Amino acid sequence: MSAKTVLQRMDEVVDDYCKRNRFQSEEMTRGRARAFVKQHRMNTRQRNSVLKLKVATNIPDWDTKLKVIKACSQEIIADHEFGGGKAHWEIITELGMAIGLTREEILKAKPLPTTEIAWAAWEGLMANTHWLEGIVANACAERANVPGYGYGAAREHGFSWTQRRSWKKLFGLTDEQVEFWHVHEDADLEHSNIAWHAVAEHAERLRMEDEVVRALALNLEVWLMYWHGICDAGDSAGA
């Protein structure tokens, strides 16, 4: 199977995921936005300080390993390329405060059961698999944020682009206050390209074409559970 065919299959899986993901395909609400901030700040720290680094440990190609570590450092230490020197979890904290949450509410938030289950699932899918399957697990949700997937404006411009506009309208925010979404318009494309390029270069040689597609589909099912948990928590909390 050619690299082009594998990537086409992967893109089809991501497109299907985006269309089934309620967090991406339904209108944002105040409750969902607040639940997102509380959960995704924790998830950003967990995935990038623990899970993604376990994948990096397994990668034999030095350049690819360093690209993954760089992406992690942008998320949890400082992003001088896209985030003005702030870590992404810091930017999401600022976003939460802009929509009316206090810093204490954000810092004291507890993971939802669906978030904890997702972490447990990713532990197996990222730490205990072949590195090529792990690197797909690293980047699959970031890929879903870039243009080319889902419906309407998200397909044309990317999910982060649509959220930047949605949150501005919903909460009356400025461009500066929705920096989190603007940062990810560019960062998610760069970060997900690391995995997509690795698959293009190595999957056929390693005869792992079917394995990487399966890893992608399985990881995205875990992400669906994570996002739908946020939707349900936000809906139950109300506006």
Image (cartoon, helix red, strand yellow):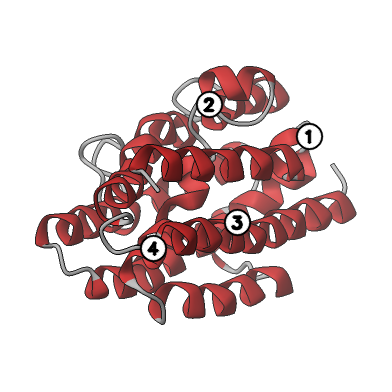
For the residue pair 128 and 223, the one nearer the viewer reads as 128
Decide if residue 85 is on the left or right side of residue 239. Answer: left
> Disc 4 designates what residue?
208
Query: What secondary structure is marked by label 1?
Result: loop
- Residue 57 in sight in this render: yes
Residue type marked 2: Gly
Mark 4–mark 1 distance (CA, rounded to whole Å): 35 Å
- Mark 2 vs mark 3: which is more N-terminal? 2
The image position of residue 102, as x and y in percent, is: 60, 52
| Tag in front: 1 or 3 | 3
Depth check, mark 4 against mark 3: the one in front is 4
Real-space Cα separation, disc 2 to disc 4, in angstroms: 24 Å
Disc 4/disc 3 C-alpha distance (Å) = 18 Å
Does the residue at mark 2 contact the one at mark 3 (Cβ under 8 Å)?
Answer: no
Q: Residue at x 84, y 41 (%)?
A: 239
Q: What amino acid is at disc 4? A: Met
Residue 100 in view in this figure = no
Picture residue at 51% right of the left edge, 30% below the top = 178
